[in-house]
Structure formats: C-alpha cells, structure tokens
C-alpha cells in the first residue's frame, strides 16, 4: 500500500470515527446536567472538541494525500525488527493495564507522570530531558488548573494527596 492510499484510508477512518462519536457515542453515553454554568466544564464539551478535531484531521489527510504524487517504486517495509515492534506493542498494552491499576492507588496526577515518562522512553524519544520535564510539568499544571481554577475534583490516590 502506498502512502497516498494509506493516508486516504486513514482520513476516511478518522471521518467515520468522528461521525460515530458525534452522532451515536456522545449523545447516547455522555450525560450532562442542564445547569452547567460554563460550557468548558460541561462533560460534553471535550468529547465534542476531540470528535470535531478528529474529523478535521481526517479531511486534512484526504486533502493533502490527493496532492501527493502516486508512488512509482515498490514499497519497502520501514519496520527494522518486527519482533521488537510486537514487543513494544505488548509493552504499551501492559502500560495501559498498569495505568488502570495505579489510578485509584496513587491518583491521576502521579500516574500520569509515570505513564508519560514510561511511554516516552518506550517510543524511544530523541529528547529525554524534555520528555521527563513534560512528564512532570504537564500533569501538575493541569491539576493546578482543574483543582484550583475550574474547581473540578481531580482523583487523588490513597497514599499521596496534592494540595
């Protein structure tokens, strides 16, 4: 499969996923009280935003892939070592499972820090210092915003509690 064909198929998939989210998943499974004072605090806002961005990304992929030239040479597999790739896939699945186990025990902020850092090294980042700095600062800044500005309770763990 050529890059152009792959991008068109991924774009169509993103549009279909966004349509499913907007037309079925969000209206059926996401509930929101009618008295939410700020639209950004509504449980519907972020799913709508992510679904919309997914659809826009799909359209962008299709539009940019149409402008690409058709491939003229045969494809070469860009995976250097398939067993290692499967190992990384299994590792990220394990990280997801451990994340679900850690959330109630150490809380969302600390779990996010650890998962961010582990995932950055699992995908072999070229910028480990930036990844570690982001792994610490992004969850803390988000916690500070949601807990202290928006007044939303962020799940805390059993062992360590943030102010």
Image (spheres, rainbow, N blue to C red):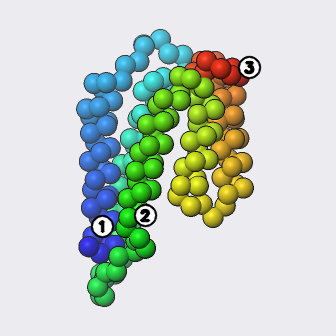
Q: Earlier in the sequence, mark 1 or mark 2?
A: 1
Instruction: Tell me residue 144's x, y (percent).
Output: 70, 28
Quarter of the rendering containing residue 76: bottom left
Cα distance in 3D space between marks 1 and 3: 47 Å
Q: Quarter holding the N terminus?
A: bottom left
The mark closer to the camera, 1 or 3, is 3
Q: Quarter holding the C terminus?
A: top right
The mark closer to the camera, 1 or 2, is 2
Left or right: where 112 falls relative to 132: left
**Numbered label attached to residue 84:** 2
Q: Which residue is mark 3?
A: 163
Which of the pair 124/144 is nearer the observer?
124
Q: Is residue 16 above or below residue 102?
A: below
Cα distance in 3D space between marks 1 and 2: 23 Å
Which of the pair 124/90 is nearer the observer?
90
Q: Earlier in the sequence, mark 2 or mark 3?
A: 2
Q: Earlier in the sequence, mark 1 or mark 3?
A: 1
Instruction: Tell me residue 87's x, y (percent).
Output: 42, 57
Q: Which residue is mark 1?
A: 6
Left or right: where 73 falls relative to 143: left
Q: Is residue 25 above or below residue 58?
A: above
Quarter of the rendering containing residue 10: bottom left
The residue positioned 66% from the left and 52% from the top of the image is 131
In contact (CB < 8 Å): disc 2 and disc 3:
no
**Numbered label attached to residue 65:** none
Instruction: Tell me residue 32's x, y (percent).
Output: 41, 18
Cα distance in 3D space between marks 2 and 3: 42 Å
């Amino acid at each position: 499969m050529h890059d152009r064909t792959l991008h068109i198929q991924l774009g169509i998939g993103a549009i279909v996923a966004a349509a499913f989210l907007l037309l079925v998943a969000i209206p059926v499974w996401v509930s929101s009280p009618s008295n939410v004072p700020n639209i950004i605090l509504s449980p519907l806002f972020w799913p709508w935003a992510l679904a919309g961005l997914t659809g826009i990304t799909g359209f962008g992929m299709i539009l940019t892939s149409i402008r690409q030239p058709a491939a003229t040479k045969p494809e070469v597999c860009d995976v250097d070592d398939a067993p290692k790739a499967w190992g990384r896939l299994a590792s990220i699945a394990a990280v997801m499972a451990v994340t679900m186990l850690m959330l109630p025990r150490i809380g969302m902020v600390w779990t996010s820090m650890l998962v961010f850092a582990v995932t950055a090294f699992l995908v072999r980042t070229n910028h480990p210092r930036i990844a570690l700095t982001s792994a610490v600062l992004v969850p803390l800044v988000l916690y500070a915003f949601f807990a202290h500005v928006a007044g939303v309770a962020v799940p805390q763990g059993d062992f360590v509690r943030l102010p």
